[in-house]
Image (cartoon, grey):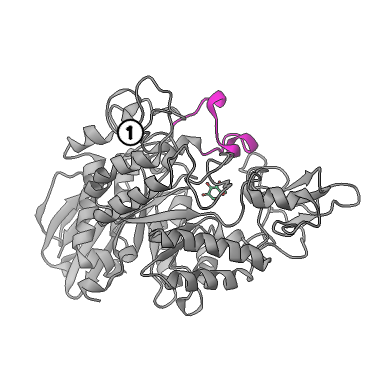
């Protein structure tokens, strides 16, 4: 593959922005589109290829925007469509693509479609959602559980029927078996593509279809009281149904009518089931999100290596890989692996084969913030105490001023700012040549400029210390060695077959230059990118 052949979504890094938490431009304690515009120069400086915006559409905010009451507008909290257009224009002027979140599985219960659907059993939209009569005893139609805890069914007093909500009670599931629903949602996709967005991150796309017979889900024998609620059942009848395929093909056909649009799917499935979403003859999603690094609970070299191997082995011919280290639904990277290994993790993310997705603030080493119960906002926290997602959604830390520069000092941000923001913020780290931010930026730049790292082959090396993961990235004679030490102890490596090397980046950012690959050391928790 020559330098010119990769598409933008293969060569660039995706940066996820949670709009509520990025930058508040109008002093209401909540981030907004104008705030993102203000920070486009930072995003450009960081070196990302695309931003993905979590939902900014009109919403009662029961699930902070994942409960949408109008798919084709902007919630006044975040701005308006003119702001959005300006954002796209200004991002594009900096060669940054813009991806939006598309939430097809459910609307808000305040969406006019649901208002109409719930009005009577014979209204024109009566079957736009999943309605069912109560069981003879008055109970819900089956045992399906909401991801936020409790039954996934809610009895509607007007229709005297239950509606399905796989998430919050204010997020009724659409009936994707209804062609009218499909048509309406495809119109939404066209609306945003016509407005210039470069791609969609499709929310829980693997949940769109549910068993037509509404059979009970089996219980998961591995689940124990105290575990988070969603794995309590094996979601045999509520996820990953084959009926999905037709819809994904349609979405892809739609995307292909535009120039270089990308479809990314949120899919929490093991590799063998995940890769099916690339579609037959790859006519499906371009990037079914690969979340296995987020899910990994044991940050060990061998575990990560096994994971990369099994992913690479599972990819169908022609499928483009991707990696995600963090997002708005999961404990932050630094909290999962610690601040020291987080640097190794960033080097891994940015040197593996496949498109990396970086969650805002992870480039600074932002960690989860403990939220006092009285300030809890997330519906998941209410249904599954202790498993809420507020801790990873706290305001971006821009500088050392009060509220970390997210909003003015006199304003209370919607979630508290991390107490140590004075150490971990953009301004401080921009001034420190060895900061996490400096490392991430350097790795992004290197990846962008180096075809072998960007889209070369991946080849793991055997015969290295057990605590190390070492691999080659190669393209047309260009060769890079990545050596990562997952332990706190120094590790000695001898790779004489590699020939002379040049250290291009160390995670410690304190060494560069010639390296004897036949005999070298990685310091504790050091990673090196070595040009061969
Ligand atoms: C996805 C989103 C999550 C949301 C849920 C329901 O998992 O990432 O934040 O709560 O879908 O829309």
* Residue drawn where x is 50% and y is 45% of the image: 329
Q: Quadrant of residue 471?
A: bottom left
Residue 320 forms part of the magenta stretch: no
Q: Is residue 308 above or below residue 119?
A: below
Residue 48 x/y as whole percent: 28, 53
Horizontal side of residue 523 vs 269, given as left or right: left
Residue 481 x/y as whole percent: 22, 62
Quarter of the rendering occupied by the C terminus: bottom left
Horizontal side of residue 71 vs 395, given as left or right: right
Quarter of the rendering occupied by the N terminus: bottom left
Residue bearing the label numbered 1: 397
The main secondary structure of the magenta stretch is loop
* Residue drawn where x is 65% and y is 49% of the image: 112
* Residue drawn where x is 18% and y is 61% of the image: 449
Residue 379 forms part of the magenta stretch: yes
Residue 68 x/y as whole percent: 57, 47
Farthest bottom residue? 281
Farthest left residue? 514
Q: Residues within 10 Å of mark 1 (few under 14, many from 20)?
A: many
Mark 1 vs ligand 1: CB under 8 Å?
A: no
Farthest right residue? 136
Farthest front residue? 82
Q: Which of 141/532 is in front?
A: 141
Element type at marker 1?
loop
* Residue drawn where x is 81% and y is 50% of the image: 161
Q: Which of 235/396 is in front?
A: 396
Which range of residues does the magenta coloring cover? Answer: 369-389
Is residue 373 in view? yes
Residue 52 x/y as whole percent: 40, 52
């Amino acid at each position: 593959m020559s330098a010119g052949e990769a598409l933008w979504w293969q060569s660039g890094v995706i940066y996820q922005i949670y709009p509520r938490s990025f930058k508040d431009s109008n002093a209401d304690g909540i981030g907004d589109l104008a705030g993102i515009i203000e920070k486009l120069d930072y995003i450009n400086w960081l070196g990302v290829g695309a931003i993905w915006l979590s939902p900014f559409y009109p919403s009662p905010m029961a699930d902070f925007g994942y409960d949408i009451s109008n798919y084709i507008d902007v919630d006044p909290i975040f701005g308006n469509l003119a702001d959005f257009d300006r954002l796209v224009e200004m991002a594009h002027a900096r060669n940054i693509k813009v991806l939006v979140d598309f939430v097809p599985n459910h609307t808000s219960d305040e969406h006019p479609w649901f208002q109409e659907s719930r009005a009577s059993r014979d209204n024109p939209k009566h079957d736009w959602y999943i309605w069912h009569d109560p069981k003879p005893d008055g109970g819900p139609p089956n045992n399906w559980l909401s991801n936020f805890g409790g039954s996934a069914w809610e009895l509607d007093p007007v229709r005297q029927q239950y509606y399905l909500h796989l998430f919050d009670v204010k997020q009724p599931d659409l009936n994707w078996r209804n062609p009218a629903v499909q048509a309406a949602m495809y119109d939404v996709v066209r609306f945003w593509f016509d407005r210039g967005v470069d791609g969609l991150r499709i929310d829980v796309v693997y949940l769109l279809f549910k068993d037509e017979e509404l059979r009970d889900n089996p219980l998961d024998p591995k689940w124990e009281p105290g575990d988070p609620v969603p794995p309590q059942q094996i979601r045999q009848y509520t996820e990953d149904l084959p009926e999905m395929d037709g819809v994904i093909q349609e979405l892809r056909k739609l995307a292909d009518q535009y120039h270089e649009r990308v479809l990314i799917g949120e899919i929490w499935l093991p590799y063998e089931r995940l890769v099916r979403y690339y579609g037959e003859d790859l006519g499906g999603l371009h990037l079914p999100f690969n979340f296995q690094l987020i899910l990994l609970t044991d940050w060990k070299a061998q575990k990560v290596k096994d994971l990369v191997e099994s992913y690479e082995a599972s990819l169908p011919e022609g499928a483009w890989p991707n990696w995600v280290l963090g997002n708005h639904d999961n404990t932050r990277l630094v909290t999962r692996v610690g601040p020291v290994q987080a640097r190794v993790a960033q080097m891994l993310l940015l040197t593996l084969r496949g498109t990396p997705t970086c969650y805002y603030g992870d480039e600074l080493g932002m960690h989860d913030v403990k939220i006092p119960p009285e300030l809890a906002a997330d519906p998941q926290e209410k249904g599954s105490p202790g498993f809420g997602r507020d801790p990873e959604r706290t305001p971006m830390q821009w500088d050392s001023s009060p509220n970390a520069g997210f909003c003015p000092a006199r304003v209370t941000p919607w979630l508290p700012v991390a107490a140590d923001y004075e150490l971990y913020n953009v301004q401080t780290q921009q001034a420190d040549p060895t900061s996490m931010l400096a490392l991430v930026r350097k790795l992004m730049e290197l990846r962008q400029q180096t075809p072998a790292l960007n889209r070369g082959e991946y080849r793991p090396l055997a015969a290295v210390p057990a605590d190390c993961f070492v691999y080659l990235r190669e393209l047309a004679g260009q060769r890079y060695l990545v050596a990562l030490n997952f332990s706190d102890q120094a590790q000695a490596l001898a790779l004489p077959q590699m020939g002379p090397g040049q250290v291009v980046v160390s995670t410690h950012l304190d060494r560069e230059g010639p390296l004897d690959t036949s005999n070298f050391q990685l310091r504790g928790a050091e990673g090196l990118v070595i040009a061969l």
